Amino acid sequence: METKNKLIIRALNGEKLSTPPVWMMRQAGRYLPEYKATRSLAGDFLSLCYNPELATEVTLQPIRKYGFDAAILFADILLIPQALGAKLWFVTGEGPRLSTITDQNDFDLLGDIENIDQVLSPIYETVRKLSSVLPDETTLIGFAGAPWTVATYMIAGRGTPNQKPALDLIKTNPEVFDLLINKITHATVHYLSKQIDAGAEVVKIFDSWAGSLKGELFERYCIEPSKIISDELRKIHPNIKIIGFPRGATNNGYLNYAQSTAVDCVAIDSSVDTQWAANELQKVTCVQGNLDQKLLVSGGQTLINETKRIVKALSNGPHIFNLGHGITPDADPSNVTKMIEAIRN
């Protein structure tokens, strides 16, 4: 099937479809027993990311099980820091840990962007494998973390509840912060371009901590880097489709992001009112979202009703059904089936 005929591509081209295409953030993950079995073969999370055979397998598992309209590359947003020379490891039950960037000396230890492929080449091989084996109707999505979100981890050395270490560095050492954002931005352009070369048809920019940026900081460190990434990718790959996700932005922030970055689709979190999204955001872009991921834990009639409500609310414009954030490990796989049936029936 030609790329232009795939449902997600059609939605990204601005087409209103009678039934929205659907995929889920973190759809290949810990809620699936088959994922847990495959991860045990790899030994640990990072080994799974860097094993093209196993990463391909876990990416395909939810496609076989549910028939999603897209597969998203199995990787992690913190692979770019590792490729630039940061130390990265994962603590079981707690999440990622990194060596920190807090001053010029720390920044100077990072490597050149041109050398990141030495680390990331297995990721590109996974994309190539997926491109060759996915069903014809399934869109392949590549991704990267947005510069602000990646920078917050590199500065704090871990996830933080309010991104205070990064916000503090903006005040105390803005020169180093800007150098770091610039390096991540251009490394991300390179990384995503290589994913596209390998077969990704759509790329998504995850700004998971965008909501902690306010006012001018949101413009400067969320919108501007994403615009650079979008503009630069389109110079190299004019036909690439791009989804942006400035999670936690205000309504005006989402709208400004859509208009300023000119991405093909804006993903919205569960706090965004779908009627506002239909009246304002959908006028300028495709909208992706935004079921509360907690409903895939609790299930029941509420899950079905809310799924149908979102489909109806966003039915007058281009819409890709998704969650407002990634599916959680405690989600019931049978509830995913119920969600998809509610969308497609």
Image: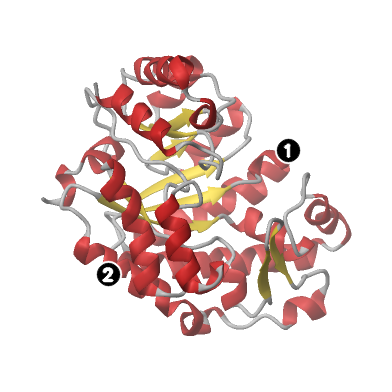
Q: Residues within 10 Å of mark 2 (few under 14, many from 20)?
A: some
Q: Position of residue 301 (x, y in %)?
A: 44, 15
Q: Secondary structure at mark 1?
A: loop
* Residue at x 78% of width, y 61% of height: 156
Asked if residue 212 is positioned above or below residue 47 in the image, the reply reads above
Residue 129 is tagged as 2
> Closer to us: mark 2 or mark 1?
2
Q: Position of residue 181 (x, y in %)?
A: 65, 62
Looking at the rendered structure, the kind of residue marked 1 is Lys
Asked if residue 285 is positioned above or below residue 204 in the image, the reply reads above
Closer to the camera in the image, 66 or 173: 66
- The quadrant in which residue 83 appears is bottom right
Closer to the camera in the image, 36 or 100: 36
Q: Is residue 140 visible?
A: yes
Q: Indicate how the structure is coloured in the image.
A: secondary structure
Q: Secondary structure at mark 2?
A: helix
Q: Residues within 10 Å of mark 1 (few under 14, many from 20)?
A: some
Q: Position of residue 13 (x, y in %)?
A: 26, 39
Residue at the spot of label 1: 214
Q: Earlier in the sequence, mark 2 or mark 1?
A: 2
* Residue at x 68% of width, y 62% of height: 92
Outermost left residue: 1
Asked if residue 3 is positioned above or below residue 246 in the image, the reply reads below
* Residue at x 24% of width, y 31% of height: 15
Asked if residue 215 is positioned above or below residue 229 in the image, the reply reads above
Residue 12 is tagged as none
Tell me whether the residue at label 2 lies in contact with that at label 1, contact meaning CB atoms closer than 8 angstroms: no
- The quadrant in which residue 339 appears is top left
Q: Position of residue 160 (x, y in %)?
A: 77, 51
Q: Is residue 194 visible?
A: no
Looking at the rendered structure, the kind of residue marked 2 is Lys
* Residue at x 52% of width, y 42% of height: 326
